Image (cartoon, rainbow, N blue to C red):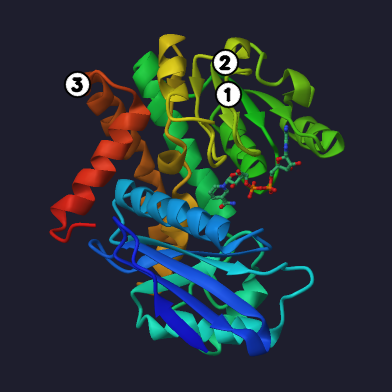
Amino acid sequence: MNIEQIPQKGYEEVVLARDPSVGLTTIIAIYSTALGPALGGTRMWPFASEELALADVLRLAKAMAYKASAAGLNLGGGKAVVIADPRKDKTRELLQAYARVVDSLDGRYVTTADVGTTTEDLDTIGEVTKYVTGTSHGSGNPSVVTAYGVLHGLRAVATELWGSPSLRGKRIVVQGTGKVGGQLARHLKDDGATLVLSDIDKDGAAALAGELGAETVHPGAVLSTDCDILSPCALGPVATDDTLPEFACKAIAGAANNQLERPDHADALQARGILYAPDYVINAGGLINVEDELHGYDPERAHAKAAAIEDRLTRIFERARTDQTTAAEAADRLAEERIRGAGRST
Ligand code: NAD
């Protein structure tokens, strides 16, 4: 095993490790540990080159730092990539060699699942290092807490737009009725919202709509469906140059990652009078859930922390008004200030 430091400007620590005997090439990026250990998932993907893998892991580690900071968690930001095809290359030996790299960082980086890694993989990693969360003995399916956090985010949107957190009678389109969107739809039904559901799995969406007394809309028409809130819970990007003219909503607030194709799409939404809830703030419930494991997992505490997304988002909307900027920019500023305020620069 060869582990080398590959310093990157703005990042606390980046390591590249190789173990040809098991086909391992991995890069672990720690953006910051100013607020606490850098927690972030392990992405296993057959990147076309080490340069592309490095670019991805740097971008993702920084995003994790912002997400954790904006969520008020005492976590830094980190991420790992393993350059391998999870369908063909994943072996116990590869995972355990990777785990030794994680272990060598002495807890400055704590891993969890991401694209290409599963709970079972984390269990294997956990045989070698204790710096892992989200194993089968841990906090379990994060989607439940993510959906609960998104619900509270939608209440903050309602307060901002209509002066009350009530979602009763609001027409809400949920794009994607998978693990998060499906659970969110149930919460929204309980809150008295008028629901419109959409999924490329039309049968799944129709079955849920039947159960909840909701309408459905064709996936191709979802963005142009007239509504109070569009809740993207499928895949990003949602706001692009092409989709901007289509929106017929007053707000966009949902779980999907990377909802804006470019940062300036936040300005474009604002110019169209559409309130955008920054994705990494409203969808932080999953991270909040795994973070709770570091304190001995308590589902009630994790839910309570996810409910606080309502207050955080309200403060971000207020800050955006004060600073005359977008909520996306206000969230970034808050996240950066908290990291800087922790005393160790990144
Ligand atoms: P999922 O795979 O369970 O559900 C996604 C659903 O979206 C699927 O049912 C899929 O058929 C549907 N879909 C895909 N493309 C669509 C389209 N164009 N139109 C309508 N439906 C479409 O995933 P999930 O865990 O529910 O995650 C949803 C989103 O939230 C993802 O972007 C994910 O990255 C993000 N997210 C999830 C969590 C979590 O805890 N699961 C945490 C943070 C962020």
Q: Can you say whether 201 is above or below 216 in the image?
A: below
Residue at disc 1, secondary structure: loop
Q: Report the Cα–Cα distance between label 2 and label 1.
A: 6 Å
Q: Can you say whether 202 is above or below 252 in the image?
A: below
Instruction: Answer with the quarter of the image where residue 84 lies.
Output: bottom right
Q: Report the Cα–Cα distance between label 3 and label 2.
A: 25 Å
Residue positioned 23% across, 27% down in the render: 319
Q: Position of residue 35 (x, y in %)?
A: 24, 61
Q: Dot 3: within a 10 Å radius of its alpha carbon, few (fewer than 14), some, or many (20 or more) residues? A: few
Label 3 sits on residue: 322
Evaluate whether residue 166 shows in this view.
Answer: no
Q: Are marks 2 and 1 in contact (CB under 8 Å)?
A: yes
Residue at disc 2, secondary structure: helix
Label 1 sits on residue: 240
Q: Is mark 1 within 8 Å of ligand 1?
A: no
Instruction: Answer with the quarter of the image where residue 197 lies.
Output: top right
Label 2 sits on residue: 244
Q: Position of residue 212 (x, y in %)?
A: 72, 32
Q: Dot 2: within a 10 Å radius of its alpha carbon, few (fewer than 14), some, or many (20 or more) residues? A: some
* Residue 54 shown left or right of residue 72 in the figure: right
- For ligand 1, the image quadrant comes to top right
Tell me which numbered mark, 3 or 2, is placed earlier along the sequence. 2
- Observer-nearest of 184 and 18: 18
Q: Are marks 3 and 2 in contact (CB under 8 Å)?
A: no
In the image, what residue type sits under mark 3? Thr
Evaluate whether residue 197 shows in this view.
Answer: yes
Q: Nearer the viewer, mark 1 or mark 3?
A: 1
In the image, what residue type sits under mark 1? Thr
In the image, what residue type sits under mark 2? Leu
